[in-house]
Amino acid sequence: MKILCVADEKDPLVYSSHVVERYGDVDMVISAGDLPLKYYEFIVSSLNRPFYFIFGNHHVEDLPKFTKRFGLEDAYDLRFERSRMGWGVGGDFIDGLALRDPASGLLLAGLGGSMRYNHGEHQYTELEMYLRVFKLLPKLFYNRIRYGRYLDILITHAPPRGLGDREDLCHTGFKAFLWFMRKFKPRYLLHGHIHLFDLNSPRVMHYCETEIVNIFGSFLLEKD
């Protein structure tokens, strides 16, 4: 299986008239945030593959369109309103959710946002991120009972604490993700937020049974 992963900055190899030639054989597209919706629309309309995304701490002006801030009663009403207003990007917003991709059977979950550093939108303290993790627990335990595992891929915007993060508060990772990996053992944690301007910077790290990948720009994940 091939998964095209994007985050943080548009990649000219993706945002290209040759995108189908390069990535037409991927099975899925995942974004870890900080990209405009128009970029997603281009990718989805070009590749016509399942698409899952979260928001980071930038490009959050459209975040309310994907959350229940309109007084809508349920998820169906929210999807209908997005469709009616032309807000959809042809994919699934999974920030704070866990779901199963019907085509591949992969179990996915998303936890967007960054460490709180200036009280901006979609920023969280460590405690707040733990609370977001705990809200996923019922679905994760259901996955364990139904499919024999908790999760395959956790999509985050920020990295785990001490694993590819930075010292400044904005780019500090979350300890909550370390606990998550120890407890639920996802095969992959895909994140963005940390820009890799040095092409020699390591993208891949490991923690317990999880492979951690910084998908800044774009990254082609190939899994068995």
Image (cartoon, rainbow, N blue to C red):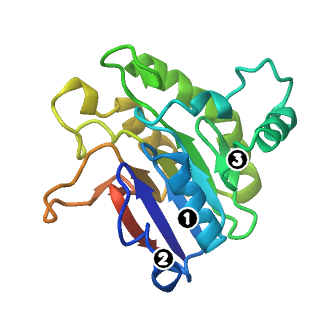
Q: Name the residue that disc number 3 marks.
A: 88
Asked if the residues shown at circle 2 and circle 3 are in contact, with their CB atoms under 8 angstroms apart, the answer is: no
Task: Check disc 2 and report the residue beneath it.
Answer: 19
* Amino acid type assigned to the residue bearing label 3 in the image: Gly
Q: Position of residue 80 (x, y in %)?
A: 85, 40
**Kind of residue at badge 1:** Ile
Alpha-carbon distance for marks 3 and 1? Answer: 13 Å
Residue shown at the point (80%, 40%) measured from the top left: 79
Front residue of this view, candidates 7 and 110: 7
Determine whether the residue tagged by mark 1 lies in a helix, strand or loop.
helix
* Mark 2–mark 1 distance (CA, rounded to whole Å): 8 Å
Q: Position of residue 58 (x, y in %)?
A: 40, 34
Q: Earlier in the sequence, mark 2 or mark 3?
A: 2
The number of numbered badges drawn on the structure is 3
Three-letter code, disc 2: Val
Q: Is residue 151 left or right of residue 85?
A: left
* Callout 2–callout 1 Cβ contact below 8 Å: yes
Q: Quadrant of the N terminus?
A: bottom right
Q: Earlier in the sequence, mark 2 or mark 1?
A: 2
Q: Residues within 10 Å of mark 1 (few under 14, many from 20)?
A: many
